[in-house]
Amino acid sequence: MTVLDGRAVYNYAVGAGFTRAEAAIMTAIAHYESGWDTTNIGDQSLSKYGSRGLWQIFTGAHSPSEVLGHGGSTWTLALADELFDPVKCARAAHIVYREQGFRAWSTYNNYHTSSGFQKIVAEASHWSSPVNPQPTPPAPKPVAAPGSGPVATAPDPMSELRKKALANAERAVHDGTDFGVGMCLRTVRGYYELPADGNEPTAASAWDDCPKANRHPGGGTKAPAGVPFIFSGGSSGAGHIVLMLGDNKGGCISTDIKRPGKADYTTIGHILNTWTDLHAEGWVGHLEQVDIWHG
């Protein structure tokens, strides 16, 4: 048994990609799921390897490749034991959350309105910015060759603008915000806190009018987190626009795809399979005369 304190659990959640507000809720979920015990095992009567780790990732519902990123479709004891690693369990929990939200955990459904649950969330919400359990070392500063003048630094891997857009989009998923059907472009503008009525009438025209240097054709698997992805076509020819998660799997947040007028986690592939009259153009680093990605 390895029991952590709440702040450590919170830090692991933030390190896996949860926003601070989400991490506070995930800290409470972990308390009710595992008692903050990294080696907790449950639900073995339902699945050979049961539910494991801080967030009780259920091996009966998810394959190793889905939540660990390797191992194929069949669990082994060694793969299941990887979920005892709080870093890997937090990453797995983030994947589950992106697909299903907090309601993937029965303890959230049963206890999120309780005083105990809310007390943990309130306490975690006041913690200062956490230390990432796996801190990334700073990138070396570029060195200019003699006489070559200043060296341009590498693009910020996650600009404040894109962080803000992702946080706003994820909040909309969680809150079930109703943007209205067919309002994808207006919605994405809102994620970036741009004026609701911009220069572009449709998502498709936003692609056409984006400077070529800022257009990145393709399927979206290489798109950075927090950039828009645009489709052309559709029943009216207006296309569609979504916000990318940057998970190297085409993960994104899209309106209308699961709930009319509301935002949900999905993938570019699922959108194309669902709305077969759309064509994937690619992601853009420029929207409404605003530079979102500098690369």
Image: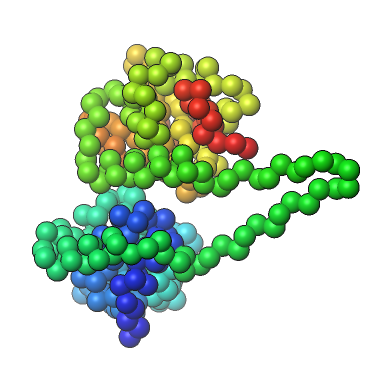
Q: Position of residue 232 (x, y in %)?
A: 45, 21
246 relative position to 59: left or right: right
The x, y position of residue 136, in whole percent, is 56, 62
Residue 259 appears left or right of 72: left
Query: Residue 155 falls in which quadrant of the image?
Result: top right
- Image quarter of residue 259: top left
Closer-to-camera residue (286/202): 286
Residue at coordinates 42% horizontally, 21% vertically from top-left? 203
Residue 63 seen in render: no
Residue at the (34%, 14%) spot, across then down: 236
**Is 199 above or below relative to 133?**
above
92, 9: nearer the viewer? 9
Q: Quadrant of the N terminus?
A: bottom left
- Which quarter of the figure is the C terminus placed in? top right
Looking at this rendering, what residue extends furthest in the right direction?
A: 147
Q: Residue at x 25, y 29 (%)?
A: 179
Task: State the residue in front, 171 or 245.
Answer: 171
**Relative to 28, does residue 215 appear above or below in the rendering?**
above
